[in-house]
Every structure is written in C-alpha cells, then in structure tokens.
Image (tube, helix red, strand yellow):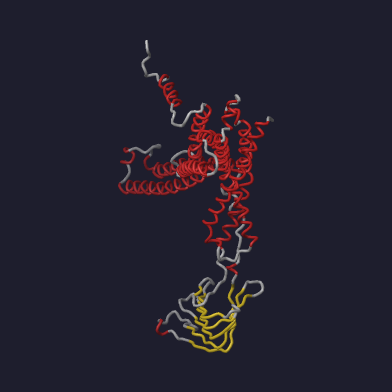
C-alpha cells in the first residue's frame, strides 16, 4: 500500500468511527425520548434497562452506518480540499478516481459488513428488543401510593392515604374501596391509623389497620331489591389486616415465540420462505374460489334438470316449461345462491387482501436488507465529491449538508415504503426509489468534482441533453 493510500485511510477512518458513534448516540437519545413514558416509574432495575439499551443499539446500526459514511466523507474531503491537499495530489498527476480508491475499498467492506450485520445480527437483536420492550410496556407502574391521592392501580381497589410518616410505613386517615364482587356496590373501609409494607417476595401488599369501621352496601346482595331497599351493614374494629395481590405489577414475558415470525425478525432466507408460502396461498385461494362458485351454479341446475329435461346450461325455453311455483322457487334459489356467493366472495377478498398486504411487508423487508447496506456506498459517492466541491471541512457545513441529504433520502424511502404497503407501487420501487435518485446524483457530483467544475456549471447536463436529442427518432436529420 502506498504512503498516499495510508494517509487517506487514516484521514477517513478516524472521522468515520467518530461520526458513526455520534449518530448512534443521537438515535439512542431519540429512542429514549420516544419511550420515556413507558420506562419511568416502573421500578426497572439497572440490568433490565441495560439489556434494553444494549438491544436497541444494534437495531439502530443499519440506519447509523449510511449517515456516518456520508458525514465522514463530507468532513474528510472537505478538509482535504480546504487545506489544498486534494489540489496537491491532483497536481502530482493523481486523478480523483485514484484518490478515492483506498477509501472506496474500505466503504465497500463496510457495505458488506453492514449487509451481514443487518441480515443476521439485527433480526435476533430486534426479537430480543421487541419482546423486552413489550413486557415493560405491559407492566404496571411501580407501587407508589401518595398522600391525598386516590390510587387505582391495584385491581378492584381504590386506596386513599391521608398522611404518611417519614418512615414511609406508618399511615393515617386511610380509606379503602373494595370492588372485588363486581355487583355495582362497594365495601368501604376506614381506619385512623395503620402500617403498610410488602411481603419479602414483593407479591403482596399488607395493610395493618387500627381503630376503624366498615360500610358494606350489599353484604346480603339480592338482585330483586331496589337500590333504596338494599340493606347497609356497618361494623367497627380495633385491628384488621388487608392483603392486596401485586402479581399484576410483576413483569410477565409473553415469550419470543409470539414475535419470531414477524418480518423484522427474519433473515433473507427466512423471508424467502414466508414470501413463497404466502404466494402459494394467494394462488390457491384464487383457484379454489372460482371452482366453488362454479360448483354452486351447477348445483342449481341439478335441482331442476329432471323437471326441465334439458342439459346444462338452463335456457329461457326450459324455464317456461316449469310451473309458476317451480319458476318462483328456482328464481328464489338462484337469488339466494348469488347473495351467498357474493358474501363469501367479499369475505375471501378481504382475506386475500390481508395476505397480500402481509406479503408486501415481507417483500419490503427483504429489499431493505440490501438497500440499507447499499446506501452506505451510494452516500459515499454523494458525500465524497460534494465535500471536494464545497471545500469546507470541520463539522458545521458538512453536518448541515449531510443531515439535509439523509433526511431527504429517509423521507423518500419512508414514503415509498408506505405506498408499497398499501399496494400503490411495487415493493421493489418503494424501497429502491431513493437509491435510484442517489445513483445518478452521485455520478453527476463525482464527474463535477473530477473536472473541478462548480455545481453551477451545467455543461454536463447540456451534453447529456444534446445526446438524447440526437437519439430522438422523430427529429429530422440534417442533409
């Protein structure tokens, strides 16, 4: 490897890893901002939070790599151009295509690693992340009964505590409403003082109440009585214990099997199998529905074949031979059969569209495995010549330009995916449309940078337009 190639690689690799980590950190902060309400107040331990963030980091890598490549390319070649190092290399007879060759090899390696990572590591980490996040979201907030607040998180109970001592255990002025009987009536318990503590296994909350009374609106519940006739029972106590089940506050995992067949949790080979299976289901549904409708029509004809003494199909002359009650019966049967067939067909169409929509999602994910990886290479061809043209290093301008380009790329990609999911366009076009825009843009910028022409110079576009005009078969040839 030549000295020049080593210098370029050292100049590029440093900013690449730095910008990649910064972009990854930004994505993690965006994730934290999005799910902060699901994480706060549930008493999650450090290990659970650490696992969640660890899994999330791997799911953001496919998005962080292209942006890292774009930003580092802009910074590297912007610095080289600003310090006139790029000009010095060109003066020595080294073309821009040769200058970018060592970095291009590195980016190609990054693209291959990105595909292997996206195809093998990301599905596994996405499965772990989605399962853990769903368990956390389904978990109730940690038990925290505040003073003067009616606490409703314990199933079928409403608790109000007037005052707590500093030990957070001794409580005063307690009111507890019991709705466990689900009859519309409640049992109210009041106590002047008491203690509140959890069992060692944290499965139950134990209240020890002192000096109180109980109001029971329907101890002898009789549904035939009116509300005004319902007896009221009142009792007093010096000491009483109440136990509340806290099992619903514990995190209960639904298991990874529930999500393992989701399109985001599969690699390319698994996606292929699911797509083929769904395509076979769609083909079988189309054939089966046609045969079923034909059998129902033939069934109508068989009912009246003996009476009409005619072969299928039924004609007007044969129908006239029937008596009026037979004709009415035949028309009624035909109309009912058509109605049944219409209902069945509409139901089958809904099922067909559901399977087709699900198939599109799997096809979109299949194409994304390749498009996100290839985006690293395409964004390099955009950022590298653009940095050489702008001639501004540092972080300010390259960051602004790279964020703008990536946002446009992401918006176009997201819009295309949504259109593909509803069947407006094909999954291939929906996923690859943004790449189709980046490819000619990268070629155009690379040409402009190699010829040291500014972006305002549109001579290349004029040349291409003239060539296309000469290829026009409708244009008259000069004699």
The extreme top residue here reads 479
- Residue at 41% x, 49% y: name it: 343
Labels in figure, total:
0
Q: Residue at x 34, y 39 (%)?
A: 318
The answer to which image quadrant residue 464 occupies is top left
> Residue 285 in the image: x percent, y percent?
49, 43
Above/below status of 462 relative to 221: above
Q: How far across and how far down the image is residue 424, in percent?
A: 43, 41
In the picture as drawn, the residue positioned furthest to the right comes out as 1
Residue 41 vertical position relative to residue 476 in the rendered view, above or below? below
Out of 430 and 468, give the one closest to the viewer: 468
Question: Residue 277: image x %, image y %?
Answer: 56, 42
Q: Position of residue 259 (x, y in %)?
A: 58, 52
Task: Please state which of residues 77 and 306 is positioned toward the viewer in this rendering.
Answer: 77
Quadrant of image for the C terminus = top left
One can see residue 457 in this view: yes
Quadrant placement of the N terminus:
top right
Return the residue nearer the eye: 223 or 414.
414
Residue sitting at x 51%, y 33%: 389
Q: Can you see residue 360?
A: no
Q: Is residue 425 above or below residue 472?
A: below
């Amino acid at each position: 490897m030549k000295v020049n190639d080593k210098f370029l690689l050292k100049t590029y690799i440093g900013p690449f890893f730095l910008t990649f980590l910064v972009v990854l950190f930004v994505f993690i902060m965006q994730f934290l901002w999005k799910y902060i309400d699901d994480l706060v107040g549930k008493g999650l331990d450090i290990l659970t939070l650490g696992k969640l963030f660890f899994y999330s980091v791997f799911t953001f890598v496919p998005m962080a790599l292209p942006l890292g490549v774009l930003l580092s390319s802009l910074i590297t070649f912007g610095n080289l151009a600003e310090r006139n190092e790029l000009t010095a290399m060109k003066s020595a007879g080294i073309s821009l295509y040769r200058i970018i060759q060592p970095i291009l090899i590195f980016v190609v390696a990054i693209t291959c690693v990105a595909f292997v990572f996206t195809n093998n590591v990301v599905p596994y980490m996405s499965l772990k992340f989605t399962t853990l996040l769903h368990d956390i979201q389904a978990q109730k907030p940690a038990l925290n009964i505040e003073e003067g607040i009616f606490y409703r998180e314990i199933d079928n109970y409403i608790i109000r505590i007037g005052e707590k001592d500093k030990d957070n255990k001794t409580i005063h002025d307690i009111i507890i409403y019991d709705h466990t009987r689900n009859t519309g009536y409640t049992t109210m318990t009041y106590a002047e003082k008491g203690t509140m503590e959890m069992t060692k296994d944290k499965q139950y909350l134990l209240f020890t109440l002192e000096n109180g009374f109980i109001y029971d609106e329907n101890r002898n519940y009789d549904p035939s009585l009116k509300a005004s006739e319902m007896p009221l029972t009142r009792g007093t106590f010096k000491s009483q214990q109440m136990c509340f089940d806290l099992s619903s506050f514990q995190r209960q995992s639904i298991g990874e099997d529930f999500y393992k067949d989701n399109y985001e949790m599969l690699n390319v080979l698994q996606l292929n199998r699911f797509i083929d299976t769904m395509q076979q289901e769609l083909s079988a549904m189309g054939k089966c529905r046609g045969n079923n409708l034909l059998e129902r029509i033939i069934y109508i004809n068989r009912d009246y074949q003996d009476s009409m003494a005619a072969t299928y199909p039924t004609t007007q002359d044969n129908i006239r031979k029937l008596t009026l009650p037979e004709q009415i019966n035949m028309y009624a049967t035909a109309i009912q059969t058509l109605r049944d067939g219409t209902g069945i067909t509409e139901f089958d169409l809904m099922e067909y569209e559901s399977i087709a929509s699900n198939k599109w999602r799997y096809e979109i994910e299949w194409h994304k495995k390749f498009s996100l990886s290839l985006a690293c290479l395409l964004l390099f061809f955009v950022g590298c010549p653009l940095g050489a043209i702008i001639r501004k290093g540092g972080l300010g301008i390259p960051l602004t330009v790279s964020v703008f380009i990536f946002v446009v790329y992401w918006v176009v990609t997201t819009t295309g995916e949504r259109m593909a999911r509803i069947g407006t366009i094909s999954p291939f076009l929906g996923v690859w449309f943004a790449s189709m825009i980046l490819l000619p843009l990268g070629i155009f910028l690379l040409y402009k940078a190699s010829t040291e022409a500014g972006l305002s110079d549109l001579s290349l576009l004029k040349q291409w337009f003239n060539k296309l005009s000469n290829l026009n078969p409708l244009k008259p040839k000069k004699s």
